[in-house]
Image: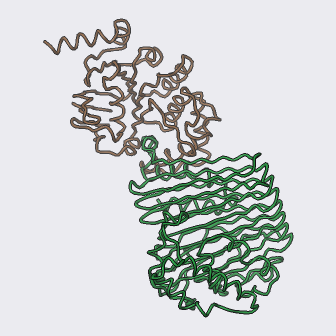
Chain colours: A brown, B green
Amino acid sequence: MLSIKNLHASVDDKEILKGLNLEVKAGEVHAIMGPNGSGKSTLGNVLAGREAYEVTGGEVLLEGKDLLELSPEDRAREGVFLAFQYPVEIPGVSNINFLKTALNEIRAYKGLPPLEAREFLNRVKEKQKLVEFDAKLANRSLNEGFSGGEKKRNEIFQLAMLEPKLGILDETDSGLDIDALRIVARGVNQLRSQNNAFIVITHYQRLLEYIVPDFVHVLYKGRIVRSGTKELALELEEKGYDWIKDTVDAEGAA
Amino acid sequence: MITQVSDSLYSQLIKTYGENLPSAEPRSLDEIRKQAFERFKRVGFPTVKHEDWKYTNVQPLVNQHYELDVEPSFAAIDLNNAGIPRLDAYRVVLVDGKYHAGLSDDVSDVQGLSIMPIDQAFERLCFAKYFAQFADKTDNPFVALNTAAFTSGLFIEVGKNTQLSKPVHIIHVSAARQPVFNQVRNLYVMSAFAEAEIVESFITDDAAERNLNNLVTEIMVREQAKLQHYYLQTATSQSSYLNHTEIYQEKHSLYNNYNCTFPGPAFVRNNINVRLGDSEVESHLYGITLTAGNQLVDNHTIVDHLKPHCESYEWYKNITQDTSTAVFNGKIFVRTDAQKTNAFQQNNNMLIGEKSAVYTKPQLEIFADDVKCSHGCTIGQFDNDALFYLQARGISEAQARILLVHAFAFDVTSRFANATVREYVEHLVEEGL
């Protein structure tokens, strides 16, 4: 589904990603772990198309289509969804109105007619239940005055509504208490299918107890330096990131 | 002191009207006009050295040649640009200030509503009572000039206890095929317990030459009366406006003004002054200004609390694009008598154009000691994080911008009493981006 080859990217002329390779197939969940500053969030933002992140080399294909050529909105319409680490508050834009606009623009891109009002509302109800998102919040302004947990849950609610091919969760676990974490993870697990894939970016192994990944990659200095199964996450948790840093830096020196 | 002897409109006005002001029965008006002209002659047109005109330079406008008192051509006036979808209203059309009977609805059957060209109202009792009683007390030289030499405009009286079932939609069309200086004078009287909505649209005919419009509107809102008043400024770059509105409110009355300006007219200066002349009065002033190109839009408001137990609420939002300029100057007076006043003022600005500018000046002058007043002002730019967030959900950049500007304007547009006008204004905001 997603193929990243030798990706280089910089922010403010500082190179953050230095030749990243990753293959994600439909139905898979990949976890990206790594110490602070290793480039995890940069990867999410580059895939979603944030302007400040400049791609200086490499390619990213989504089902064979060159993702880097596309505007952020077209990436979303092609099926990329970034669950933000820091969702933005937008007073005056109602959550529901925003979702309806987004959903219908994605449908129009695919040549589909807008959803009927009733169909849309049924879908809202169904997905709200799935991610245990309070109906009162859905009718408020987008993220305005939401708690950290409510914002993250709203991200997953949007993900459920838009049904992307590729969901990228950028540190969705940060700032969540254990109950909120469980709810978010349950939502994601219910959305997993043979037709979609997830990239779960996280600093801690904790989230991966709930969203069990097929593969775990360790990002360090802008490259994936270790790949393995979920056991790698456990090993990391036990030995800490210094273990990776030391072994990788030693390899580099040798 | 004559400050601008050399400017062409000034000397033209002196030459034309110096010994020859417009005159009609009753002769009582002659003296008012004469005195007003003397006032204008003394001060001339303002320059940027006058505090009230610091950011709004009228000199380039008045240093051009215009024709005065042009007979309007009523041929082929296109009103499409003033149409408000689904608004059912009594339509009144003024072409360069002159009442156009053919395009206006006949309201002679409507109980308690009188609409007529202002020169037909001179003999009316309430004309004599209210004309030039309010606006002329200000030191705006354009008011003095208007009083001295206006030749057209509109008189509206809504009778005692009359509640109009439909709004009055006044369409001001600038249409002259030669450069003109129009002076339009309006007087609206809301009698006791009357209720009405007045919607005013400003448009430019496609074939019009450049025009400068000096409008003065005096509004009397009598005891227990309610008036909802909309300004929808959608003219084109050929048109410039000096628009002075003076409102006087009596006991238990309500006046709401919704002042909306969109990309188009090159120069707009609004003065909106509300005098809360008795107790238990309520006034709301709302403003949406969306500018583009090289436009200048200046909104000066005065909310004057003269008596106790009144409430005023003012909220203006400016959105500036390209190299345009918006000015907001909001002054609140709370006079010694005006105890228990509740006055609120807010002005928020969003600069979209990197080279656009906003000048804002909230002012409070409080002479009473038991009052609640607040004012606030913000200036910000487009939130790029919010824009990206919306795009990342599949919303196009253009649509995302519209959503964000709507969101910014929401505090004001949500206050519109008339949902049809509100929808129209939201549509104009979308079109103006």
Q: Residue at x 61, y 50 (%)?
A: B346
How far across and how far down the image is residue A162, in percent? 48, 38
How far across and how far down the image is residue A167, in percent? 42, 31
How far across and how far down the image is residue A12, in percent? 28, 36
Q: In which quarter of the view is residue B99 placed?
A: bottom right
Which residue occupies the foreground of this view, B18 or B214? B18
How far across and how far down the image is residue B353, in percent? 41, 55
- Give the answer, above or below, for where B24 lies relative to A46: below
Which residue occupies the foreground of this view, A221 or A197? A221
Q: For the N terminus of chain B, give its image quadrant.
A: bottom right
- Give the answer, above or below, for where B89 lies relative to B54: below
**Residue A158 shows in this picture:** yes
Q: Residue at the far top: name it.
A: A238
- Give the answer, above or below, for where A94 lies relative to B83: above
How many marks do you count on the picture? 0
Q: Residue at x 59, y 75 (%)?
A: B141
